[in-house]
Image (cartoon, rainbow, N blue to C red):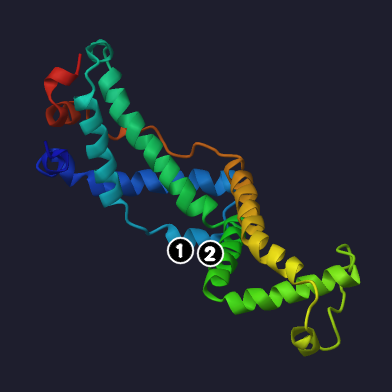
Amino acid sequence: MNYKKKIKNSPLAFRINSISKEVFTIWLENAKTAYNLKPDLINKIQNDKFEDVFLNYLSDAIKILVEDKSLEKKTVPGWSFGYVCGNVQGKLEVTWYNKYILEASIEYENILKIKAVIEYFKLDTLLLDKIGTIYSHLLEQRVQPSVDKCEVSPNLISIFKYKNKNNSKIDDFKSSIVELLSTDIQAKILTLLNLQHYDCCPDLDKYFNFDEIVEIAGHENFA
């Protein structure tokens, strides 16, 4: 059954656009306070359109409800309607949080920077060889990592021309650097996922008409 088509052919179709816009406006207002959003981000996203996303999530929620064979839950008054509203609300919250909070953060940008370096290493192995040479040089010079400013060499060219005796160190560096950066990415992702998350999406039972949802999903799925 194509529930997206059924929604488009129902009275609800005429209100999806206004509902999605109002729900996002409220979400953004709540998120602005919860996450201290910057004005330039708010100006950038406040006029985004969400009708298609809203429609997709609603049709998916109705499809899951209809295909759920648990009649026991469906015989509980209000359960089916609450499930549809809650399912759509939860997906919208996750989608908007990921897109406008996580992906707009400095932490997320730093993850992409490291990812870009990893991908470039895969394309330019010669660059990785040169970085490995510098790494070997730093090991030989026992450069203290805590020093903010240290000169690698008065002349980098002399390092690259130098026939390094520590080829094993360079090979070790080349084999471990991507893994090291990947581990750093995973750590940053965990930090990102552990950031405080607030529920900013309003309850959708205020926006959906019970009878409209019943008509789309079928009376047999409601108590």
| Horizontal side, residue 50 vs residue 3: left or right | right
Residue 162: % across, % down: 79, 85
Q: Which of the 4 image quadrants contains residue 65?
A: top left
Task: Give the structural element (helix, strand or loop) at label 1.
Answer: helix
Q: Which of the 4 image quadrants contains residue 165?
A: bottom right
**Residue 129 visible in rendering:** yes
Above or below: residue 79 compared with residue 114: above
> Which quadrant, please, contains the N terminus?
top left
Residue 168: % across, % down: 74, 67
Above or below: residue 93 compared with residue 205: below
> Which quadrant, please, contains the C terminus?
top left
| Horizontal side, residue 197 vs residue 66: left or right | right
Q: Quick one: 15 or 144, which is closer to the camera?
A: 144
Marks 1 & 2, CB-CB < 8 Å contact: yes
Residue 74: % across, % down: 24, 15
Amino acid type for the residue under numbered disc 1: Lys
> In the drawing, what numbered circle is on residue 40?
2
The residue under the point 52% across, 46% down is: 31
The residue under the point 64% across, 48% down is: 187
> In the drawing, what numbered circle is on residue 128?
none
Amino acid type for the residue under numbered disc 2: Asp
> In the drawing, what numbered circle is on residue 44?
1
Q: Quick one: 202 or 138, which is closer to the camera?
A: 138
Looking at the rendered structure, the number of numbered marks drawn on it comes to 2
Residue 180: % across, % down: 67, 56
10 Å crowding of disc 2: few (<14), some (14-19), many (20+): few
Above or below: residue 214 compared with residue 1: above
Cα distance in 3D space between marks 1 and 2 = 6 Å
**Residue 205 visible in rendering:** no
The residue under the point 13% across, 44% down is: 8
Q: Quick one: 167 or 36, which is closer to the camera?
A: 167
The residue under the point 44% across, 42% down is: 94
